[in-house]
Image (cartoon, coloured by chain):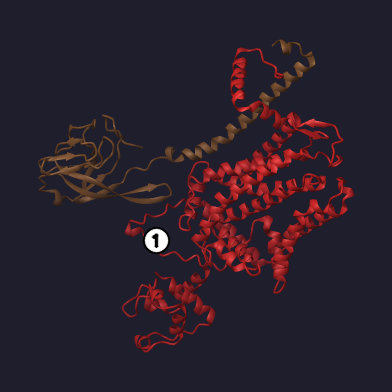
Chain colours: A brown, B red
């Protein structure tokens, strides 16, 4: 500090002015850059903000097939969805589960723990996840292992004798069933 | 010697202490000092802002380019869809694409101003020859970026302009055709061409640009700014003023002007995307970007034997002379009016170039048929931009299977047109898939060579005659096209 105070007055003022100018320029360019980054951020985050398409209904099979079901049965469904700039058809596994009295429900095969595919083990009458041993009973309720909730039931309906399901994914590792997106 | 003034407030003191910490480890202050305290002989001028402007534009192109690559796919079956998606669906997509496309034009304009200033001021003299040479490489690289980037949207304009542009290459003696095929990745334009142009545009040329920009700036700093044309190129004679603050402010103001101008143009006149590339569109009249129009016009004027001399030899000679200017104009004199050869030579070139451009525009405007077709093409672009975005159909859904797209290879496309127009489809089916009366032709290329197929078309076997195949009456060019189409069926 003593060094600065010993400098001639004019030089110190000049220096201060230059420092101020420096801050002014840095501030101005910062402001312009911030303005320019707005479209960039909007562009890059667009897929996260865009309205997510309503999940479409997929055919599981004719109701007759499941009429005399004694145990859960696996089915592959095709899900049409918009994947960025293209329409894509994804195949997903679901379980059709009899709930008594001829009624059915459809469970997602995605484990609510970390997303592995849960398998139906007929001899034990259990759904068992091959990754971390999450175990569910024949209605999908959680019995043992790390999952925090039951297997996720999917919205389903019967239309013209066809069992239809709306495939959705849910957040993993939490106790509530919360759809993603 | 500590020369910075420590501000009094606690916040700035904290900031200053943090700066000390950083400076001690990075040497940031001395770096900033060296960057900013650059003596400019004769003081700052608006004439010196173009170099910084170009650097800013390059950064802008790099940033917008990286962002566009978030959605772009360099393949002939997805490129147009993804650019259409960027333009019509993604937030700020049309704006960023416009900034990127117009940025290329802006670079060409500012490059011209930068070169003109350097030339008029004789800033390439004495110790600065290599700055000029590295600048020449940068100029070529930038023009290469403009050329390779032009194809990427894969619309008709892009496709045909590049087809013509790469055809010029085949004029180069001895290595012309291999050179053209290496660049295209095949004899014809196709998806391999697109991949190659993408790699050049995104990896190779930008890498070289960064290297040459670094060299250019390093050499510039080594020699120091040349200053006004009254300055002696060998030893400094004029009073010098530092780069900071006045020249920096001018440079920043110029860059700001560029930003604002680009943003306004991009916002109010967004760039258009035309319908997807389709080589079978025989009516299409390709026109290059305006700054390449004079070259286009020049090539149009040449014919026969002159096309090599005028199309390859003369431009190469001009480029060589241009690059050699510092070695030809070696005197100490820098004032433009005392260097009439260089200055009038350059002015003459610019006048010719502009004249050719004007001539091209005039010819297009005065030819009613061309003008009408160009207007139709423009209208097609406007209409395409108005259409809502159509997502690419899934390849898994049988119902959505696309009809086989017309090949991008012009020869095959011509063959397809002959096939579709002739009686061929009556018996062999619309897509040569075969019917009850005539066999399927898909895969026929695996069975017969092109020569054999051409022979069979004109000299039917007994089996073909018995089957009802009529005689084919086509000249050699049409036969070649039809054979190319048949062999492409897989």
Q: Is residue B168 left or right of residue B231?
A: left
| Residue at disc 1, secondary structure | loop
Rendered residue at 34%/85% (across/down)? B467
x then y, percent, for residue A91? 29, 50
Rendered residue at 61%/41% (across/down)? B59
Above/below status of A133 relative to B144:
above
Q: Quadrant of residue B63?
A: top right
Few, some or many residues within 10 Å of mark 1 (<14, 14–19, 20+) = few
Q: Taking the image as drawn, is residue B98 in sight?
A: yes
Q: Residue furthest right?
A: B338
Read off the chain for label 1: B
Q: Is residue B413 left or right of residue A95?
A: right
x then y, percent, for residue B260? 65, 38
Q: Taking the image as drawn, is residue B152 in sight?
A: no
Q: Quadrant of residue B230?
A: top right
Q: Which residue is mark 1?
A: B402
Above/below status of A54 relative to B9:
below
Q: Is residue A122 left or right of residue B95?
A: left
Q: Which of B383/B245 is in front?
A: B245
Q: How many labels, in total?
A: 1
Q: Is residue B188 left or right of residue B223?
A: left
Above/below status of B321 relative to B368:
above
Location of the N terminus of chain A (image quadrant):
top right
Q: Which of A22/B290 is in front?
A: A22
x then y, percent, for residue B186? 52, 65
Location of the C terminus of chain A (image quadrant):
top left
x then y, percent, for residue B435? 33, 76
Rendered residue at 58%/64% (across/down)? B163
């Amino acid at each position: 500090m003593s060094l600065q105070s010993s400098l001639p007055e004019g030089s110190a003022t000049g220096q201060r002015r230059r420092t101020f100018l420096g801050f002014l320029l840095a501030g101005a360019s910062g402001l312009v850059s911030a303005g320019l980054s707005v479209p960039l951020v909007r562009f890059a985050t667009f897929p996260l903000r865009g309205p997510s398409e309503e999940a479409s209904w997929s055919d599981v099979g004719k109701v007759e097939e499941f009429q005399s079901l004694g145990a859960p049965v696996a089915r592959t469904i095709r899900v049409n969805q918009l994947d960025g700039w293209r329409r894509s058809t994804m195949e997903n596994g679901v379980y059709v589960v009899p709930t008594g009295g001829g009624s059915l429900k459809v469970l997602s095969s995605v484990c609510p723990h970390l997303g592995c595919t849960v398998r139906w083990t007929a001899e034990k009458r259990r759904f068992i996840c091959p990754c971390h041993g999450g175990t569910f009973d024949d209605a999908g309720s959680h019995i043992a292992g790390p999952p925090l909730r039951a297997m996720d039931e999917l919205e389903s309906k019967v239309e013209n004798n066809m069992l239809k399901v709306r495939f959705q994914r849910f957040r993993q590792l939490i106790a509530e069933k919360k759809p993603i997106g | 010697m500590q020369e910075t003034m420590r501000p009094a407030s606690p916040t700035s003191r904290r900031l200053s202490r943090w700066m000390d910490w950083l400076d001690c480890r990075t040497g940031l202050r001395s770096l900033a000092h060296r960057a900013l305290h650059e003596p400019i002989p004769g003081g700052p001028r608006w004439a010196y802002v173009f170099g910084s402007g170009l650097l800013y534009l390059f950064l802008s192109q790099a940033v917008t380019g990286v962002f566009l690559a978030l959605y772009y796919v360099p393949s002939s079956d997805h490129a147009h869809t993804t650019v259409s998606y960027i333009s019509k669906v993604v937030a700020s997509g049309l704006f960023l694409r416009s900034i990127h496309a117009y940025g290329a034009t802006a670079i060409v304009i500012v490059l011209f101003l930068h070169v003109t200033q350097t030339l008029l001021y004789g800033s390439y003299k004495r110790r600065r020859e290599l700055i000029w040479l590295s600048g020449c490489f940068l100029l070529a690289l930038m023009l290469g970026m403009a050329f390779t980037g032009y194809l990427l949207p894969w619309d008709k304009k892009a496709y045909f302009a590049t087809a013509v542009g790469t055809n010029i290459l085949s004029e180069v003696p001895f290595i012309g055709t291999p050179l053209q095929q290496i660049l295209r990745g095949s004899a014809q334009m196709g998806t391999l061409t697109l991949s190659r142009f993408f790699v050049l545009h995104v990896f190779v040329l930008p890498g070289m640009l960064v290297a040459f920009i670094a060299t250019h700036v390093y050499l510039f700093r080594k020699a120091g700014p040349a200053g006004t044309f009254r300055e002696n190129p060998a030893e400094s004679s004029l009073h010098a003023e530092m780069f900071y603050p006045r020249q920096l402010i001018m440079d920043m103001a110029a860059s700001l002007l560029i930003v604002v101008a680009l943003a306004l143009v991009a916002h109010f006149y967004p760039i258009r995307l035309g319908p997807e590339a389709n080589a079978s569109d025989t009516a299409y009249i390709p026109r290059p970007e305006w700054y390449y129009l004079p070259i286009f016009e020049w090539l149009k004027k040449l014919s026969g034997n002159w096309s090599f001399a005028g199309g390859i030899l003369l431009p190469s000679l001009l480029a060589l002379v241009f690059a050699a200017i510092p070695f030809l104009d070696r005197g100490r004199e820098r004032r433009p009016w005392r260097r009439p050869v260089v200055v009038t030579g350059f002015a003459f070139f610019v006048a010719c170039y502009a004249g050719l451009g004007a001539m091209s525009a005039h010819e297009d405007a005065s030819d009613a048929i061309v003008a009408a077709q160009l207007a139709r093409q423009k209208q097609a672009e406007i209409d395409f931009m108005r259409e809502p975005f159509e997502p690419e159909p899934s390849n898994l859904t049988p119902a959505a299977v696309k009809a086989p797209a017309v090949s991008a290879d012009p020869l095959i496309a011509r063959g397809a047109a002959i096939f579709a127009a002739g009686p061929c489809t009556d018996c062999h089916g619309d897509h040569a898939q075969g019917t009850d009366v005539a066999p399927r032709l898909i895969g026929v290329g695996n069975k017969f060579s092109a020569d054999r197929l051409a022979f069979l078309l004109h000299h039917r076997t007994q089996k073909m005659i018995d089957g009802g195949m009529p005689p084919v009456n086509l000249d050699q060019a049409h036969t070649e096209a039809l054979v190319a189409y048949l062999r492409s069926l897989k």
